Amino acid sequence: MSATLTPPHERRLLLTLAGIQFSHILDFMIMMPLGPILISSLGISTHQFGLLVASYSFSAAFSGLLGATFVDRFERKSLLLWMFGLFGVATLACALAPSFITLLIARALAGAFGGVMGAMVQTIIGDVIPFERRAAANGVVMSAFSISTIAGVPISLWLANWLNWRAPFVLVALLTVIFVLVGRQVLPTLRHHISAEKRAHPFVPMFAVLREANHRRALLFSALIIFSGFTVIPYITLFAVHNLAISQLQIPLIYLAGGAATLITARLIGRYADSHGKVKVYRLVAIAASVPLLIVTQISAAPLWLWMIYTTVFFVLVSGRMIPAMAIITSAAEPKLRGTFMSLNATVQSLAMALASSLAGFIITQSATGEIIHYEIVGYVALAANAVAIWFVARIVMHQARPPVVDVALK
């Protein structure tokens, strides 16, 4: 039937999308703090570890590009749940991988399904949530990052430390089953975007997106933000363990503190962006994020408590940029092409992640004593990309039209 979502159902929708994102983010995030364990257990180098991180992102980039040819041809809910289910199967394959090569392949498969899935979450937000509440809605969904760092990563690391590195992937696979069942009951059926033209010509929407200059600017902006973060993020745990002598058993405390802080700040940033301007708030948070980007890559010694302060500020500001940024990016899309645009955005973001982690992996080396060398160079690269994004954001035009009346099947 044709209807708009009631406030209680809208909240259930956002919480369900946050749960799906939680599973997705945890699967991706857990690779980084697992770095020292994986390097030891599989006997791999820092470069090979960088490939494990990058394989997920490169695969997600390819699948996002492929998804741009078909996502607007299918009903949103069904496509999201199918991608999510296949993502869970691929994550279970990661847990069962017997070697580095098989783990690399399984990570690539998880990235392939995760790339389309992440784009669909943002597409549904853009389809259903009005522009004036969109940053706040992104804040709710992106609280998945906070909960992942508060609970998901510490629990996963505890399982990895006391069982083995495979246990966190089993946990994610189980979460996938739970949220697929919840999603079937809560997510609305969205068909308003489907047209005969899209069914007949799968490449037409993708070319239509790329012909629009504003879309291209938004995609470049998205790539710059992701690149500036993911040159640094994958190697924070390795740097803490090998350079600052922080125990692997203490790493969960770092994620617990950072996640607890972002759980509070994510919604505050979202509401502030809606009321004071998305571009203005993005720039303020991104400028502030330059400080922890510099500190965590330059510091030579710090006790655990001081490192926790630095990394908590890092989590709050570096991830906080994404809340107004995703509202800007989502609103840059023509509504009828939003699914295709967000799939291309997922491709661009994943490619930026892969290039960032790969570049950083080649810049960084380990000394004979195991210390991480040249991390400060990675920090300079991140600062440069962040500065360009801050300058570039004003060139993006946002569409502020209200969401259309959609086909909503309320369960």
Image (tube, rainbow, N blue to C red):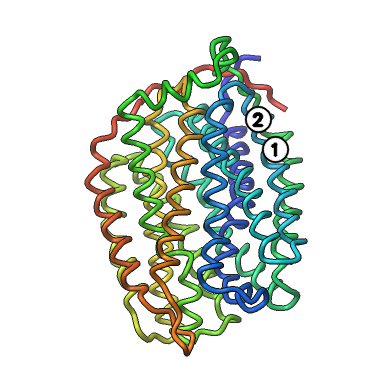
- In the image, residue 264 above or below residue 214: below
Is residue 269 shown left or right of residue 80? left
Decide which of tag 1 and tag 2 comes sooner along the chain. Answer: 2
Residue 102's x, y, as percent?
A: 70, 59
Q: Quadrant of residue 82?
A: top right
Residue 77, numbered circle? 2
Q: Quadrant of residue 116?
A: top right
Q: Which quadrant: the N terminus?
A: top right
- In the image, residue 349 above or below residue 189: below
Looking at the rendered structure, the secondary structure element under dot 2 is helix
Is residue 305 shown left or right of residue 151? left
Furthest toward the bottom, the residue is 369
- In the image, residue 297 above or below residue 59: below
Of residues 275 and 59, the one drawn nearer to the viewer in this rendering: 59
Q: Residue at x 43, y 54 (%)?
A: 355
What is the spatial separation of the Cα atoms under label 1 and label 2, in whole angstroms? 8 Å
At label 1, which amino acid type do we have? Gly
Q: Which residue is mark 1?
A: 183
